[in-house]
Image (cartoon, rainbow, N blue to C red):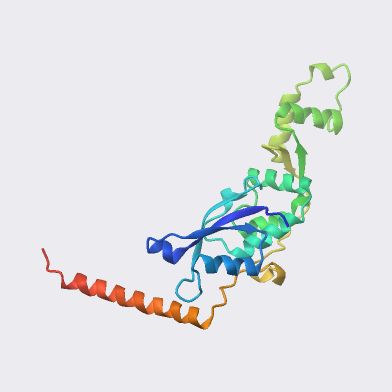
Amino acid sequence: MAALFEAYITNAGKYAEGRPVGETLKFPTSAPEVEALLKRIGVDGVRYQEIFITSFDGDVLGLYDHLSEYENLDELNHLARLFSELSPGELETFEAVINKGDHTSSVADIINLVHNLDCYEFFPGVTEDETLGRIYIEDMEALKVTEDVLPYFDFEAYGRDVRLNEGGHFAPGGYVRRSGGDFQEAYHGIGDIPAEHRVFSFPRLSIPEQMAAYKGIIDGSSLEHERRASQKEQPER
């Protein structure tokens, strides 16, 4: 399955220690791929357990403006799986709606938007009021204009009024508007993610690897204790 977007995953613990390490994860992904990546960047589930996302990239226009550094990998993968089921036209509609700013407050909000794209209508290539006005008059016959008046009709003013009245929006790819229907909240949280879309799992460590991880915790604690003790012993100036 082709990657739809990617995220640069960073080991939060090593980053805090001044030793940044990370790697790009492509979505959709799988649990073995996530385990292998976490192991490579040192997130072992013992000494290092936290990650954050440094950056996003991909072909879904506008998506990354609404994603944060602490997104859940299972939710991101679920979203990517939903994207993979969309037709090119549906993906264009999604990009137009997200450019409009509807339902973008969280990944959960965006997932629900994908489930409700039938609540929107998208007009590809329509990016200004005059063209919109002509579509409504000449193609949709939203207003009866006689042939003798048509050459003098102000399509731009009419298109602007239509856009404002229906809350439409010119996105980079075309014009989008709500087309009716009730927006259904199909996704309520991580518990709604299908098992086959869940991917986050710490690496399975061998016994020697577990011992090394726990030793790192002990050694790190000892160094921190020595550092604090040294600071207390320094004479006041």
Answer yes or no: is residue 141 visible: no
In the rendering, at what x and y percent does residue 23 appear? 53, 58
Q: Is residue 25 above or below residue 144?
A: below
Q: Nearer the viewer, residue 138 or 26?
A: 26
In the rendering, at what x and y percent does residue 116 appear? 74, 54
Q: Nearer the viewer, residue 111 or 150?
A: 111
Question: Which of the image's four quarters has the N terminus?
Answer: bottom right
Q: Is residue 102 above or below residue 173?
A: below
Q: Nearer the viewer, residue 109 or 84?
A: 84
Name the residue at 64% across, 69% down. 31
Name the residue at 45% across, 82% down. 211
> Which of the 4 quarters of the picture holds residue 114?
bottom right
In the rendering, at what x and y percent does residue 146 appear? 88, 21
Name the residue at 45% across, 64% down. 12
Answer yes or no: is residue 229 visible: yes
Question: Which of the image's four quarters has the C terminus?
Answer: bottom left
Horizontal side of 235 relative to 216 (left or right) equals left
In the rendering, at what x and y percent does residue 163 appear? 71, 35
Tally of marks: 0
> Which of the 4 quarters of the picture holds residue 15?
bottom left
Residue furthest to the front in view is: 208
